[in-house]
Image (tube, helix red, strand yellow):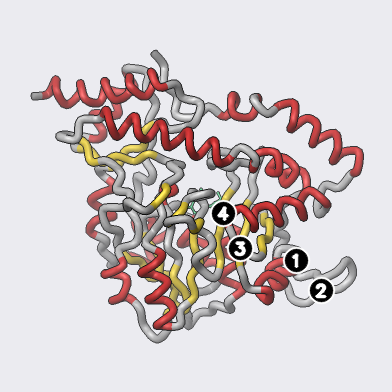
């Protein structure tokens, strides 16, 4: 049996007719940049997350960058986040002109709130918690802390469209929620895309201008900025795909449950999800011993797996000058143990069970 990590072809061809119709409709109107689809999508997305506003942008990276610029970070500002994330989380801080301060993660793979408190200084302007894999970070404690210290929260919800704490969706806790529609995400465009959610009207208007090279209308510009727009065509596709997101997230949860019930806990550390949380399992990350040997073993059995992420951000080549002295104990330890198993919604139960069997066999055979 073959188990591929992703199945984008199936995911998009299932919707081929609807996506084709959108393409024809938008082509007829020739609204490729701004337009009706984008406005509709922003309203629908804000309502889906539970915020007043949403601003479509060109990627999750742009969402993080623009949110940071919106609160005027500069070289005297510190922004706290984790080293256990995709590069963009830290890259956006550096590009926005602020100083990143990295905190370790706990066994949930998300920000360790106790360690975070010690990193807050009078220069801390914002915290970027990452809801890694679609597993919500501890937003209740974080929100309390940020309020007390008057620090902004920018949620990196790139992997977490639809994830919830109780009934409240991530992206609605902080001052900003930043989402990605990269083709591999649970809610995906047919290319790059992203969105920022917020309840703040002033931020909303600033973000709309900032994504549009600083132009507030066709002919006049308020400040210099980049072109970071989400185009109308992608928004059209996303309007169709948004209808399916709850089902996609639920199907991923069904797959996760199969893993949780069938992987041998004697050998494998499973994802740690708080009881009251709904994780959307953009990734299903386990922690194991002898990870690299296991990968080879699984590959031989035609099972494709990944590592998110093999090099923590502070160890990347681009980080050399900024983070040469920092030690993040768990982040570094986990980077050698983590393994992402196939979790996409188009997998069949027998494929998941096959993966479980092979992993369990690997450790049993060794005994
Ligand atoms: C945690 C996290 N933050 C930020 C991003 C950046 O999103 P994008 O690829 O859309 O720029 C990603 C996407 O890979 C991500 O996983």
Given this view, does label 1 or label 3 mark the residue nearer the observer? 3
Q: Is residue 237 left or right of residue 166?
A: right
Mark 2–mark 1 contact, CB under 8 Å?
A: yes
Report which residue position mark 4 lands on. 179
Report which residue position mark 2 lands on. 221
What residue sits 71% from the left and 68% below the top?
Answer: 210
* Residue 362 rendering spot, x and y as whole percentages: 20, 23
Q: Which mark is residue 213?
A: 1
Q: Quadrant of residue 243?
A: top right
Mark 4–mark 3 contact, CB under 8 Å?
A: no
Q: Is residue 337 left or right of residue 201?
A: left
Report which residue position mark 3 lands on. 51
Q: Say if disc 1 is inside 8 Å of ligand 1.
A: no
Distance from disc 2 to disc 1, alpha carbons, whole Å, reads: 8 Å
What residue sits 39% from the left and 67% below the top?
Answer: 140
Distance from disc 3 to disc 2, alpha carbons, whole Å, reads: 28 Å
Distance from disc 1 to disc 4, alpha carbons, whole Å, reads: 20 Å
- Which residue occupies the foreground of this view, 138 or 246? 246
Residue furthest to the front: 167
Circle 4 crowding by C-alpha within 10 Å: few under 14, some 14–19, many from 20: many
Distance from disc 1 to disc 3, alpha carbons, whole Å, reads: 25 Å
Given this view, does label 3 or label 2 mark the residue nearer the observer? 3
Circle 3 crowding by C-alpha within 10 Å: few under 14, some 14–19, many from 20: many
Which part of the image, by quadrant, shows the N terminus?
top left
Q: Earlier in the sequence, mark 3 or mark 2?
A: 3
138 is higher (above) or lower (below) than 366:
below
What residue sits 47% from the left and 59% below the top?
Answer: 89
Mark 1 element type: loop
- Which residue occupies the foreground of this view, 332 or 119? 119
């Amino acid at each position: 049996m073959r188990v591929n990590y992703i199945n984008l072809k199936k995911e998009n061809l299932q919707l081929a007719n609807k996506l084709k119709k959108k393409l024809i409709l938008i082509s007829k109107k020739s609204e490729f940049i701004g337009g009706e689809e984008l406005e509709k999508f922003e309203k629908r997305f804000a309502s889906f997350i539970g915020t007043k506003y949403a601003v479509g942008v060109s990627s999750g990276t742009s969402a993080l960058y623009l949110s940071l610029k919106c609160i005027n970070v500069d070289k005297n500002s510190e922004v706290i986040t984790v080293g256990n994330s995709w590069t963009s989380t830290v890259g956006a801080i550096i590009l926005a002109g602020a100083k990143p301060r990295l905190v370790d993660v706990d066994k949930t793979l998300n920000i360790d709130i106790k360690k975070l408190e010690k990193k807050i200084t009078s220069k801390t302007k914002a915290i970027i918690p990452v809801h890694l894999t679609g597993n919500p970070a501890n937003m209740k404690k974080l929100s309390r802390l940020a309020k007390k210290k008057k620090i902004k929260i920018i949620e990196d919800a790139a992997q977490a469209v639809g994830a919830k704490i109780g009934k409240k969706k991530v992206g609605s806790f902080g001052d900003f929620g930043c989402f990605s529609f990269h083709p591999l995400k649970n809610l995906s465009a047919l290319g790059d895309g992203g969105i920022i959610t917020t309840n703040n009207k002033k931020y909303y208007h600033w973000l709309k201008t900032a994504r549009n090279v600083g132009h507030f209308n066709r002919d006049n510009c308020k400040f210099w900025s980049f072109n970071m727009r989400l185009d109308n065509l992608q928004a059209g596709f996303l309007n169709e795909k948004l209808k399916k997101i709850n089902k996609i997230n639920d199907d991923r949860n069904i797959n996760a449950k199969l893993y949780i019930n069938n992987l041998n806990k004697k050998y494998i550390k499973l994802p740690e999800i708080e009881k009251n949380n709904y994780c959307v399992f953009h990734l299903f990350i386990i922690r194991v011993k002898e990870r690299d040997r296991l990968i080879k073993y699984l590959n031989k059995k035609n099972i494709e797996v990944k590592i998110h992420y093999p090099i923590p951000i502070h160890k990347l080549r681009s980080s050399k000058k900024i983070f040469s002295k920092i030690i993040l104990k768990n982040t570094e330890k986990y980077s050698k143990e983590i393994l992402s198993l196939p979790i996409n919604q188009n997998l069949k139960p027998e494929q998941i069970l096959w993966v479980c069997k092979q992993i369990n066999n690997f450790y049993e055979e060794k005994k």
